[in-house]
Amino acid sequence: MKLASLALASGLFLGAAVVPSWASEPAEPTTAQATTTIAGQVIPVVAGGLYARYHSNPPLSVIAQEAPQIDLSWFRTLTKTRVDMGFESYSPNFYYNNSRVTAVFTADLDRLRALMPAKVLEQVQPLQIWPGRGVVALTAYAYHYCDNDSYNEIALSIVTNKPGASNLGPISLISQSMSKDLWGYVLKLPVNTELARVRGVVGYNLPKWLTPIDYRETDTSVVVSISDSQTGKVDVTLETAKLDDLSQDVELVTNSFTNLDHQAELSYGYAVSRQLRHASTTRSDAVKLTLGDGSLSTYIQSLKLGSLLKYEYVPQFQSALYAPAPLQTMLVRE
């Protein structure tokens, strides 16, 4: 099967309109800090930032006033509800202006299966693209302006079948791509703010930890550097091309994940992304992944990455991330 025919869709999870001047800048620590309490943990937040003032529920009128360049029409069609997710919050969480790059690789299928909990494997399995090879997505996000202020995030995820659906390998992969309904299991999810870490761990039981992540752009590329949380040295560098043939056709993509909640029960979560500018390619020279000797690099090396199946360059998107729910609720609906 030719790689170009696989037609993989968006990088998994969590996973913007006209970009204001600050939107392409990487998230940087802010010197002015306040604190907030989430699930009994006192954590730093940006003083005067959206989260400090509104705790995930800012009025859209405030967003319109503070960032008038952003098109809020989609968000006006969505309704937030108050939820208990280990702490009081609102769902969905809004991400008003963001960028991402995604590299999709083949990986060792046995290793991917070994990394998933047995209970999760009863419902979903890695998609086998050809004998012995599964699929992983490595995505770098820059959330320039969102309910949680701004931060950077790296997602390493296994591409799986949808719970309750057959695992037909490449057929399932193409079907998910065409329907823009993507499923996976999150392996790693480092972030560069404590607010993002605590919310992700407590609220979603996701494998987040705090470490420096630099997301920057040159004239021709996006360069993402991930430091090792123990040594502080750069461990992983993802350098990707800025593609020229950007589509401005708006696409809605749903990225869902299956995992275990804090009671070890099956759950799922999802984000709907509104992609405003996007392009993709299967060219192997569009992505350069450099691994060091830190913990994340060692983990990635254990996956035995192979061919690049697809690269996605999405300099503008918006997103709504929904609170997790028991997987059974979705299976009953289906």
Image (tube, rainbow, N blue to C red):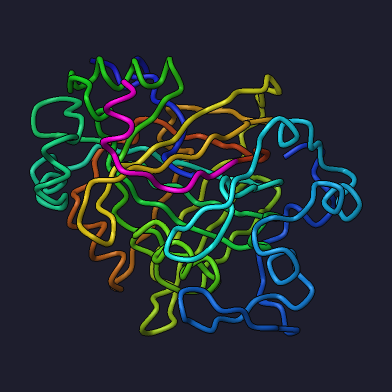
Which residue sits at x=11%, y=38%? 122
**Front residue (pair 235, 121):** 121
Which residue sits at x=81%, y=36%? 71
Which residue sits at x=20%, y=26%? 129
Q: Position of residue 314 (x, y in %)?
A: 60, 37
Q: Quadrant of residue 234?
A: bottom left
Residue 323 within the segment the image draws in magenta: yes
Q: Quadrant of residue 193?
A: bottom right
Q: Which residues are magenta?
A: 320-334
Which residue sits at x=56%, y=61%? 152
**Front residue (pair 227, 173):** 173
Vertical order, 45 against 204 (above or below): below
Left or right of 69, for residue 96: left
Left or right of 220, for residue 201: left
Q: Position of residue 13 (x, y in %)?
A: 44, 43
Vertical order, 121 against 281 (above or below): below
